[in-house]
Image (cartoon, grey):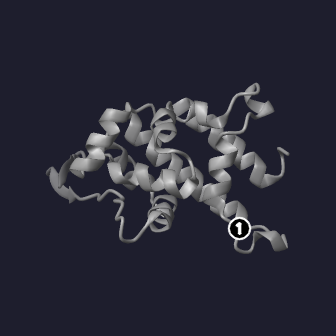
Amino acid sequence: MKSTTQQVPGRKATSKAVSITNVTYSPSKGIDDFVMNVHAADPMRLIETERKGVAGIFVKDLSRRMEIPAQRMFDILGVPKATAEKKVAAGELLTGNGGRAALGLARLLGIARDIVDNSTAPEAKGFDSARWLGQWLETPQPALGGRKPADFIDTPTGLAVVTKLLGAIESGAYQ
């Protein structure tokens, strides 16, 4: 629990306790539940999640769900395979840049799900947005100079570029 002190001129200082919980991944609830919670989380919960980290097993489960080999997923996140495997085996959190990138992938998956959910196309029913996102991340994009979106996920700025591009797809501004 974090405590903050507010000072108002002419008043005695007050102490207000603020507790912010992070978004956690539960393998029993699955990828979709985590993605939904990340997508709906307010910025303060996301910041706390970025600081604490993401369950290492989330990366393995996400790689299966997106049909991206685990080794490639580790590369996309900028995490050495040995580190990622150790975190998964020990049930530890993936922190730092790798954890933030994993959380970013969850946010991208939330956007991809929104695209499908907002579509009126008959093909949208039963569409596997996770599998599609996995394929899209590995497809060179003209808007990225012919590079794959997956090549940008490991940095905050790169993730922002990919998020913007995915948003442009949803709005129809990018074909």
Residue at the disc numbered 1: 127
For the N terminus, give its image quadrant: bottom left
Q: Relative to 25, does residue 103 appear above or below in the rendering?
A: above
Task: Give the residue drawn at x 71%, y 67%.
Answer: 127
Residue at the extreme top of the image, as rendered: 145
* Quarter of the figure with residue 158: top right
Q: Can residue 120 be seen from the camera position used here?
A: no
Residue 167 appears left or right of 76: right
Q: Position of residue 150 (x, y in %)?
A: 60, 36
Q: Position of residue 100 (x, y in %)?
A: 42, 41
Neighbour class for label 1 at 10 Å: few (<14), some, many (≥20)? few
For the C terminus, give its image quadrant: top right
Task: Give the residue drawn at x 32%, y 46%.
Answer: 53
Q: Can residue 1 be seen from the camera position used here?
A: yes
Taking depth in this image into account, of 157 and 97 the one nearest to the observer is: 97
Residue type marked 1: Phe
Q: Position of residue 24 (x, y in %)?
A: 34, 59
SS at mark 1 in the image:
loop
Residue 40 appears left or right of 19: right
Task: Give the residue drawn at x 70%, y 28%.
Answer: 147
Q: Position of residue 80 (x, y in %)?
A: 37, 30
Q: Relative to 75, does residue 66 appear above or below in the rendering?
A: below
Residue 99 appears left or right of 157: left
Taking depth in this image into account, of 171 and 92 the one nearest to the observer is: 92
Q: Relative to 37, does residue 141 appear above or below in the rendering?
A: above
Q: How many marks?
A: 1
Task: Give the residue drawn at x 48%, y 54%.
Answer: 62
